[in-house]
Image (tube, rainbow, N blue to C red):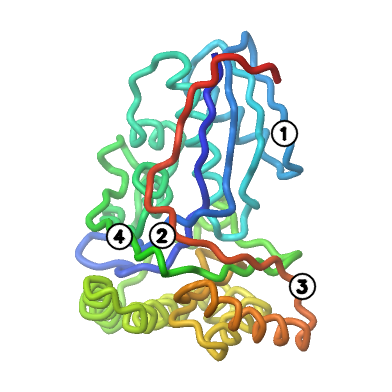
């Protein structure tokens, strides 16, 4: 018996709070259809990883299996999400692996229990929720202990979903990954995030943008209003983190891409997590093609090499299926 699990990337759309009233890093995000992670797992007496992707994944897969105290597993990695570019690859990879192994051995862990075992959700719970539910997500953030974000004590201490909604099928994201640039990994980001600073004016602007802008627009299926709120949130959050990344965006390439998407007609733009991935919100593939033409021209003019794709929102949870007869 073999189990196949498929999940996909998430875009981090920013924070609605950074540090206020003992809550830090209330996150906003969305699951997208691609890029994807697909793994196939079967029982084994030890840990064997067959990686068909060229993306380094072996360390995280081993850690995921070892966290479950099972004899072993044989894992084939069919597809993987690029690492450390702002797409939430580690959470999707490790949860996919642990979920498959847990089901294979008949363990009773919930997704949140697995996430806790895997040390996911230290800052944002969007990746966990994207795996578990898909769609557009706002989470509860992390509780502050004094002035610091503590290590989660149990699964109940992980961020919870406080709002979740599918996005309209006509809404697409143009996603752009500048090549040769990586964002911060979890080890690098930890000292930067463990003691967030309170800025009441910034908090007010973020709350206003989400509650009166983003959520009102989403209820009306108003892509223009939603996009304007998204862009506003991104620039506010970028200003806060500029002390660490040297500007509103992580690098010249991402800033150029974000501005080009906005100038080309995207309704909303941003940088996912620490970048360098940038994205633009558009309506329909025809609109996307027109903006892509403009974006391609700007990239060529600025000598920026990037991977570009158009993706819909994944409004469903990660998938799991049993494969009876399969030889790796």
Q: Quadrant of the N terminus?
A: top right
Q: Do the residues under discs 3 and 2 have CB atoms within 8 angstroms? A: no
Q: Spatial distance from mark 3 to mark 1, Cα to Cα?
A: 26 Å
Q: Which mark is residue 305?
A: 3
Task: Identify residue for label 4.
Answer: 138
Asked where in the image residue 175 lies, by quadrant, the reply is bottom right
Instruction: Give the mark, 1 or 4, whose residue is nearer the N terminus.
Output: 1
Q: Do the residues under discs 3 and 1 have CB atoms within 8 angstroms? A: no
The local secondary structure at tag 3 comes to loop
Q: Is residue 23 above or below residue 200?
A: above
Give 35 or 253, whichever is nearer the viewer. Answer: 35
At 23% across and 75% down in the image, what residue appears? 220
Instruction: Give the mark, 1 or 2, whose residue is nearer the N terminus.
Output: 2
Classed neighbour count for the residue bearing mark 2: other residues with Cα under 10 Å, few (<14), some (14–19), many (≥20): many
Q: Spatial distance from mark 1 to mark 2, Cα to Cα?
A: 27 Å
Percent position of residue 295, x then y: 65, 82
Percent position of residue 3, x then y: 52, 23
Give 316 or 46, whichever is nearer the viewer. Answer: 316
Percent position of residue 150, x then y: 35, 48
Q: Do the residues under discs 1 and 4 have CB atoms within 8 angstroms? A: no
Q: Do the residues under discs 1 and 2 have CB atoms within 8 angstroms? A: no
Task: Identify residue for label 1.
Answer: 51
Classed neighbour count for the residue bearing mark 3: other residues with Cα under 10 Å, few (<14), some (14–19), many (≥20): some
The local secondary structure at tag 4 comes to strand
The local secondary structure at tag 1 comes to strand
At 21% across and 76% down in the image, what residue appears? 216
Q: Spatial distance from mark 1 to mark 4, Cα to Cα?
A: 33 Å
Q: Spatial distance from mark 4 to mark 2, Cα to Cα?
A: 9 Å
Task: Identify residue for label 2.
Answer: 30
């Amino acid at each position: 018996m073999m189990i196949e699990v498929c999940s996909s990337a998430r875009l981090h759309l920013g924070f609605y709070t950074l540090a206020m009233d003992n809550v830090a890093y209330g996150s906003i995000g969305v699951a997208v259809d691609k890029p994807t992670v697909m793994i196939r797992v079967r029982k084994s007496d030890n840990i064997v990883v067959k990686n068909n992707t060229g993306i380094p994944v072996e360390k995280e897969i081993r850690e995921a299996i070892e966290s479950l105290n099972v004899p072993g597993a044989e894992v084939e990695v069919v597809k993987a999400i690029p690492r450390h570019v702002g797409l939430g690859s580690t959470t999707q990879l490790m949860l996919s692996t642990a979920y498959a192994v847990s089901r294979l051995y008949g363990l009773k862990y919930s997704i949140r229990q697995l996430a806790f075992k895997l040390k996911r959700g230290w800052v944002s719970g969007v990746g966990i929720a994207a795996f578990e539910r898909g769609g557009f997500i706002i989470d509860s953030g992390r509780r502050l202990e004094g002035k610091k974000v503590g290590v989660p004590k149990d699964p109940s201490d992980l961020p919870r979903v406080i709002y979740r909604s599918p996005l309209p099928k006509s809404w697409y994201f143009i996603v752009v990954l500048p090549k040769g640039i990586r964002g911060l990994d979890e080890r690098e980001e930890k000292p930067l995030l463990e003691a967030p600073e309170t800025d009441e004016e910034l908090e007010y602007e973020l709350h206003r943008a989400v509650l009166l802008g983003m959520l009102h627009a989403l209820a009306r299926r108003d892509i223009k209003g939603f996009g304007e709120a998204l862009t506003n949130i991104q620039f506010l959050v970028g200003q806060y983190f500029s002390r660490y990344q040297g500007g509103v965006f992580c690098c010249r390439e991402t800033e150029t891409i974000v501005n080009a998407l906005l100038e080309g007609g995207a309704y909303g733009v941003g940088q996912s997590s620490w970048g360098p991935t940038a994205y633009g919100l558009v309506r329909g593939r025809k609109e996307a093609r027109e903006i892509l033409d403009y974006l391609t021209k700007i990239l060529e003019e600025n000598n920026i090499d990037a991977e570009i794709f158009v993706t819909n929102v994944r409004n469903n949870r990660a998938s799991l299926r049993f494969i009876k007869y399969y030889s790796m």
